[in-house]
Image (tube, helix red, strand yellow):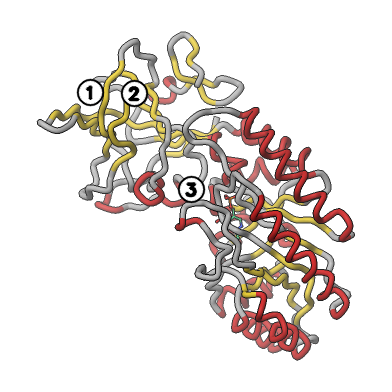
Amino acid sequence: MEYVNNELCLGPLKKALLPLCANYMRPIYVYDLDFISQRYQAMKRALGPTRLFYAVKANPNVEILQRLKRLGAGADVVSLGEIKRALESGFSVQDIVYSGVGKTRHEITEALKLGIYQINVESLPELERIGSLAKSMGKKASVALRLNPDIDIKTHPYIATGLKDNKFGMELSLIPELVKCLKSHEDSIELVGVSLHLGSMMMEFSGYKEALQILKKIYVDLQKQFPTLKRFDFGGGLGIFYDRLDLELEESLLRDYAKITLETLSDLNCELQSEPGRWLVGHCGALITQVQYIKKTSAKTFLVVDSGMNHLIRPSLYEADHLILPLVKSQENMKADVVGPICESSDFFAKDRTLGKVSEGDFVAVMDSGAYGYSMASVYNLQELPLEICI
Ligand SMILES: Cc1ncc(COP(=O)(O)O)c(C=O)c1O
């Protein structure tokens, strides 16, 4: 992590964070947009012909969306709220892939009215619902089938989505019924794609490769019956390191992932789509928070800061370990639990962490919090949401 003149900086362009705290009022999420551009371009280079649909859930900040749109990304959304946010930020309906297991009648109706590019269907009843709503509106829905191949990518159970116990996607044994349903709705549904998303924080790709091979066969079989089928959406999920910043190693993992994907699917002659979130924005954000108290008990030292699980729930929810660094470099270290103000014992950023020594009033940054940070924040305990600043 970079300190320049003892001040913590963000991103490869080394943007200083301390000046942002001149009139500090409450915790700040800071995002480095140029860093996001670099990550997008690296992924685009690696994945070649693939169209990248940024997973808006990772961080729906308008300036981030505008930047990614300008770079050529589409948007992968999971609610009408995210559709609206994407449209407000400059994406067109032709840029939007709409996933999610719980699409309501209202949401599907609005998506059909708008003419959303692709709806990724997650269940047979959803496919039925789309067919009948589209028919009643005189519309034709473009759908992709999100399939669940029951494959383990060895990630935290709360972010695995490609196992048969997960609520996501459709079991392969359901395909005959899906085909029947598609045939019965051929006036109102056009099958355009097959989609896959196995989960998040994928760092090892053997399960992913197996899933691609399985879905490839299914794609070929389905195409014989549905010549409109032309897109293969291989989802998102590429992981990042939270315990260190090693962009070179991450890019080498990206190259492995891209090689497996492109080689496996090379002979399909279809449009490739991906839905990356974390990899694009995770490292590009930091959460700045101020030390309120150093509280010592007979068991521990607690560094009590003014932000917590209400602003960044990943440590509490997924046991995620984010680096925590003082904004001004310290020569000495301290060991503490870094905790927030929320009335829950699960409200912590780190336990028994050795970090640069800080005092009351100093600022620390919880690093790599650009993905699933602000987007999962709440107003629990009626604490205010953090500020967001793009640099
Ligand atoms: C359907 C879908 N696509 C893409 C993503 C993005 O995943 P990641 O941020 O790990 O790339 C998610 C995340 O949960 C998802 O559910």
- Closer to the eye: label 1 or 3: 3
User: Which x, y percent locates residue 220?
Assistant: 84, 70
Marks 1 and 2, the one that precedes in the sequence: 2
Instruction: Classify 10 Å Cα crowding around label 2: few (below 14), some (14-19), many (20 and above).
Output: some
Residue under numbered circle 2 = 355
Up the image or down, 106 lies above or below 194; here it is below
Residue under numbered circle 1 = 360
Image point (69%, 61%), residue name: 211
Marks 1 and 3, the one that precedes in the sequence: 1
- Say which element carries label 3: loop
Instruction: Classify 10 Å Cα crowding around label 1: few (below 14), some (14-19), many (20 and above).
Output: few
User: Which x, y percent locates residue 93?
Assistant: 71, 62
Residue under numbered circle 3 = 372
Q: Which of 263/385 is in front?
A: 263
Up the image or down, 115 lies above or below 12; here it is below
Q: Is residue 47 left or right of residue 79?
A: right
Is residue 37 something that shows in the picture? no
Image point (43%, 25%), residue name: 20
Give the spatial CA distance, label 1 vs label 2.
Answer: 15 Å
Q: Is residue 211 left or right of residue 316?
A: right
Q: Amino acid at mark 2?
A: Leu
Up the image or down, 135 lies above or below 84; here it is below
Image point (70%, 64%), residue name: 195
* The image quadrant in which ligand 1 is located: bottom right
Residues marked 1 and 3 touching at CB (< 8 Å) = no
Is residue 223 something that shows in the picture? yes
Image point (41%, 33%), residue name: 366
- Say which element carries label 2: strand
User: Which x, y percent locates residue 127?
Assistant: 65, 81
Marks 2 and 3, the one that precedes in the sequence: 2
